[in-house]
Image (tube, grey):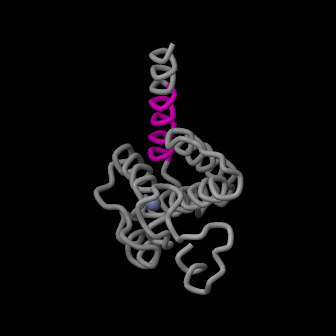
């Protein structure tokens, strides 16, 4: 949005405001990393998968952040990062073009299922995706399912 506004091509929206939080200009770094919506997603995976840092910019992700992770976690986090970015981008477009919204929990489900599918589909033995990491994602899905069920039963 920020780039489209700079060249006067933000026809769909008259502003460059982020549609995920309505609090900031939508830059790439804001949308995918710093937005409250993105921050909740990063925090969920950082907490569940026990990593201490999350990326601070898109440029830094593949240049320094993923290489700074333990070797056995790099491929997994590379895939997870791509799944996070892709699903935030899809949700952002869904909000702009379809005026439809999914919750953070729904996006977490989509990211986790996409990641598990990608890891299952990978037949490359050099991929080295840690099965511990996949199990952690599957456990986090169980946690999200239980939380969703609690929320649904409390709303009745
Ligand atoms: Zn935002």
Relative horizontal placement of residue 118, taking residue 142 as reference (left or right): right
**Going by the picture, which residue comes out furthest to the left?**
52
- The reply, left or right, for residue 44 in relation to residue 119 is left
Q: Position of residue 10 (x, y in %)?
A: 63, 75
- Residue 154 coordinates in the image, percent (x, y): 45, 16
Q: Nearer the viewer, residue 117 or 96?
A: 96
Q: Quadrant of ligand 1?
A: bottom left
Compared to residue 128, the image places residue 114 above or below, namely above
Magenta span: chief secondary structure: helix
Assess whether residue 142 is covered by the magenta stretch.
yes
Residue drawn 50% across the image and 57% down it = 76
To which quarter of the image does residue 7 belong? Answer: bottom right
* Furthest residue toward front: 14
Residue at far bottom of view: 7
In this rendering, the answer to whether 62 lies above or below 39 is below
Which residues lie in the magenta part? 131-145
Q: Magenta stretch containing residue 139, yes or no? A: yes
Quarter of the image with the N terminus is bottom right
Q: Residue at x 57, y 48 (%)?
A: 111
On screen, residue 89 above or below 98: below
Q: Is residue 124 left or right of residue 155?
A: right
Q: Of 141 and 40, which appears nearest the observer? A: 40
Residue at screen point 51% across, 63% down: 78
The number of callouts visible is 0
Up-down relation of residue 44 to residue 71 (above or below): above
- Locate residue 82, reporting x and y percent: 56, 62
Q: What's the residue at 47%, 24% (across, down)?
A: 146
In percent of width and height, residue 85 lies at: 55, 61
115 and 36: which is toward the camera: 36
């Amino acid at each position: 949005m920020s780039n489209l506004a700079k060249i006067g091509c933000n026809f769909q929206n008259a502003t460059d405001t982020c549609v995920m939080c309505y609090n900031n200009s939508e830059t790439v770094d804001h949308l995918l990393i710093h937005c409250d919506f993105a921050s909740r997603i990063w925090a969920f995976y950082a907490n569940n998968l026990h990593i201490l840092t999350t990326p601070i910019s898109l440029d830094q992700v593949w240049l320094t952040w993923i290489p700074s992770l333990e070797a056995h976690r790099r491929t997994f986090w590379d895939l997870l990062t791509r799944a996070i970015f892709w699903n935030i981008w899809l949700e952002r477009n869904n909000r702009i073009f379809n005026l439809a919204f999914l919750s953070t929990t729904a996006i977490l489900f989509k990211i986790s299922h996409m990641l598990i599918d990608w890891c299952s589909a990978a037949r490359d033995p050099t991929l080295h995706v840690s099965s511990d990491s996949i199990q952690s994602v599957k456990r986090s899905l169980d946690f999200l399912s239980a939380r969703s069920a609690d929320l649904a039963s409390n709303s009745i």
